[in-house]
Amino acid sequence: MTTRKGTRQRTAGRIDGRTPRAPAASEADIFARMHQAVLDRRLEPGMKLKEVALAEAFGVNRAVVRRVLARLSYERLVVLRPNRAAVVASPSVQESRDIFAARRVVEAAVVASLAASVSRAALKSLRTLLRDEQAAYARGDTRRGLQLSLEFHRALARHAGNGVLADFVDHLVARTPLVVLAYQSGNGDSACAEDAHAAIVDALARGVGDEAVARMTEHLTNLEAQLDLDEKKRPAPDLATLFAATSA
């Protein structure tokens, strides 16, 4: 038999009979989770990011959400629109090409630097990352595989020991999933090829900088080639037809 006391105990911690919200997330945690959602391809280009919905999801007020969106905008992952909901960034064709061009330059510098001074510990860490990546794809865990593919590129930059280059790589890698989602063709999944990463690590292990640069450049070029980045120019409308009025 249920007593009044038992009922009060079961509803303790509730307000007006409703289950209490989860503890509010910190601003740093919200930023990290939304940033990771972009990397995981869960936030798609053009998706609306409504402040009210985000505030409720994270248990915070809209001021916190606005600050997070502002930080994501600075990272070029979100577009803020006056008097309208923010949206996930949609890179243009030219911007997408520029991102891959920049990655080729920056990541070539990373592997060239790393080849000259790579340590055994760094090689061990990179090979462990490769094994984890391959295992994720083998068991069908594509999301985890993609995470590790992106992490491989960021790990190279960290091991190179140049903080500025590492920051550049982080920024460019974070924007790449939006390019992939916006322009992915039907010819592939735009994922990093396992053998491409292994070839880069092998070149680094032998200390052959030129080969490491060539393998990285080839890898990024192949990734870009999987995308449909052809300009699709629509014919200009015929104004006479556009504004033609039916006769009364």
Image (spheres, rainbow, N blue to C red):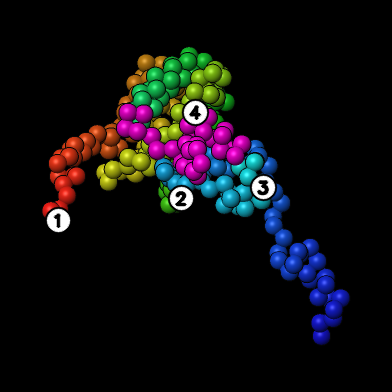
Residue at point 36% right, 41% down?
A: 182
**Residue flagged by tag 3: what amino acid is it?**
Val
Q: Secondary structure at mark 2?
A: loop
Q: Tell me the quarter of the image containing the N terminus.
A: bottom right
Of the image marks 3 and 4, the number of the one nearer the N terminus: 3
Q: Which mark is residue 171?
A: 4
Label 2 sits on residue: 141
Of the image marks 3 and 2, the number of the one nearer the N terminus: 3
Label 3 sits on residue: 60
Left or right relative to 26: residue 66: left
Q: Secondary structure at mark 4?
A: helix
Q: Look at the image and give the residue range highlighted in magenta.
A: 66-95
Which of 176/247 is in front? 247
Q: Label 3 vs label 4: CA separation?
A: 27 Å
Is residue 56 shown above or below 120? below
Is residue 134 shown above or below 7? above
Residue 73, image x, y percentages? 51, 33
- Tell whether position 90 is magenta: yes
How crowded is the residue under tag 4: few (<14 C-alpha within 10 Å), some, or many (20+)? some
Q: Label 4 vs label 2: CA separation?
A: 25 Å
Q: Label 1 vs label 3: CA separation?
A: 58 Å
How crowded is the residue under tag 3: few (<14 C-alpha within 10 Å), some, or many (20+)? some
